[in-house]
Image (cartoon, rainbow, N blue to C red):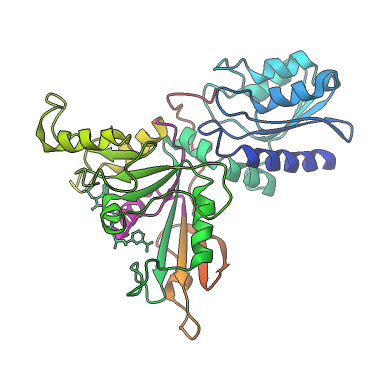
Amino acid sequence: MRSVERAALARAVALAARAHPRVSPNPAVGCVLLRGDRIVGEGVTEPPPGRHAEVVALAAAGDAARGATAVVTLEPCAHHGRTPPCTTALLAAGVARVVIGHPDPHALAAGGATALTAAGVEVVGPPPPGTVFRGGVAGQLEGFLTAVGEGRPHVTLKVAVTADGSVDPPPGQRWVTGPAARRAVHRWRSEVDGVLVGSGTVLADDPRLDVRDVDHAHQPSAVVLDARLRTPPTARVARPGTVIVTVDLDGHDTPALGPHAQRAARLRDTGVHLVAVPAAADGRGVALPAALAALAGTGIVSLLAEPGPTLSGALLRAGLVDRLVRHVAVHLGDATPSALTTPPRGAWSLERSGGAGADAIVQYRALRTPPRSIAPPTPHT
Ligand SMILES: NC(=O)c1ccc[n+]([C@@H]2O[C@H](COP(=O)([O-])OP(=O)(O)OC[C@H]3O[C@@H](n4cnc5c(N)ncnc54)[C@H](OP(=O)(O)O)[C@@H]3O)[C@@H](O)[C@H]2O)c1
């Protein structure tokens, strides 16, 4: 990869960041067209049913695309979805060289690099796994890659604790952490498709789970795991756009009868979307893998989980957390809290640590084998 192409790939990643997550569940892709050292066209994925990044960049470049190099964060798609294949558009425009930031793992959409090479286009990349560039692009596409590879959303679990390890705020306070840490949470919410809690947190705190106090171009869906439908219709999350995942306690044969169905009807009246999945094998709540798969099916491919200890523990035990963020309230004169120094059990790598106002934030990434492609129900279109 030439240095000008490396710079163009960084530019394409920055462009794609602007589209994310409004194009979800499609991947936010960036594309830069180069003639020599000159940028002749740029594009990012448009929200559905819009165009893919390559097509936007080609339209911007016009005739200048002939003989150009296309630098694109994700391998151009080679399948007919809602739009024709991007490989066809690149070939029709006469693009001579394509630089790819990350392979498309989707069983249906993949094959773009092979198709382009077969048509005589010079294809460069993607960079090998583990390189900074590959990592940067994969980080931006983590929701899409997790949905394709594992059939569930990418999950970031945020837990706030006091210096002595309590998840409850000190007496007289509403929150465990201060305004700077809470703003960081709101920024994170603005970058995901859904904000997840268990019914225990809804009953205890009546949270809104929306984005406030920071600039944002997107509101995530509130998501509640609530097997027994304890969420009151008067709860702040009981509003259009919210998803409540429950268990069909009354059975499919008599959906209009029974207290569960009556609670479901009252919640539906508020505009909430109800999804029924099987109960957890141990009878405690909903089956987590099924709940997450159902959420991916509704287009939620990235989740910020902010539940209480019950659901936090269940998600961690089930190996369904991809990133763990601890917010720790530290006060002057406190001994260093163990939540800052003790890594979580299992295989994690430290991703970031730093301060947010008076509080500290430490962030871990789960170490796993790279996801396999298992062909989810719908490819990106
Ligand atoms: N410091 C923090 O970061 C933080 C964050 C949030 C809340 N909190 C505090 O935590 C307390 C609430 O704790 P909590 O543990 O009850 O809240 P939670 O973990 O948010 O909710 C637990 C409930 O979720 C439901 N659930 C559904 N499926 C589940 C599954 N597979 N596994 C586990 N739970 C499932 C269960 O109720 P059903 O069986 O009825 O479905 C369960 O009782 C409050 O005091 C709140 O202020 C602290």
Where residue 43 sits in the image (x, y, percent)? Answer: 71, 30
Please report the bounds of the magenta region as a residue range. 298-323
Q: Residue at x 80, y 38 (%)?
A: 5
Q: Which residue lies furthest to the bottom in this view?
A: 333
Residue 101 occupies which quadrant of the picture? top right
Position above or below: 107 against 204: above
Q: Quick check: which quadrant has ligand 1? A: bottom left
Residue located 42% across and 76% down the image: 163
Determine if the magenta segment contains residue 321: yes
Count up the numbered dots.
0
Q: For the N terminus, which image quadrant? A: top right
Residue 118's quadrant in the figure? Answer: top right
Q: Which of 309 and 121 is in front in this view?
A: 309
Q: Residue at x 81, y 19 (%)?
A: 62
**Image position of 72 (left or right of 144):** right
Report if residue 26 is visible in the image: yes
Q: In the rendered image of this protein, does residue 363 appear above or below residue 59?
A: below
Above or below, 41 against 93 in this view is below
Indicate the position of residue 98 as horizontal and vertical percent values: 75, 28
- Give the percent coordinates (x, y) of residue 15: 69, 39
- Is 103 covered by the magenta stretch? no
Name the spot of residue 293 as percent of width and height, x first: 37, 35
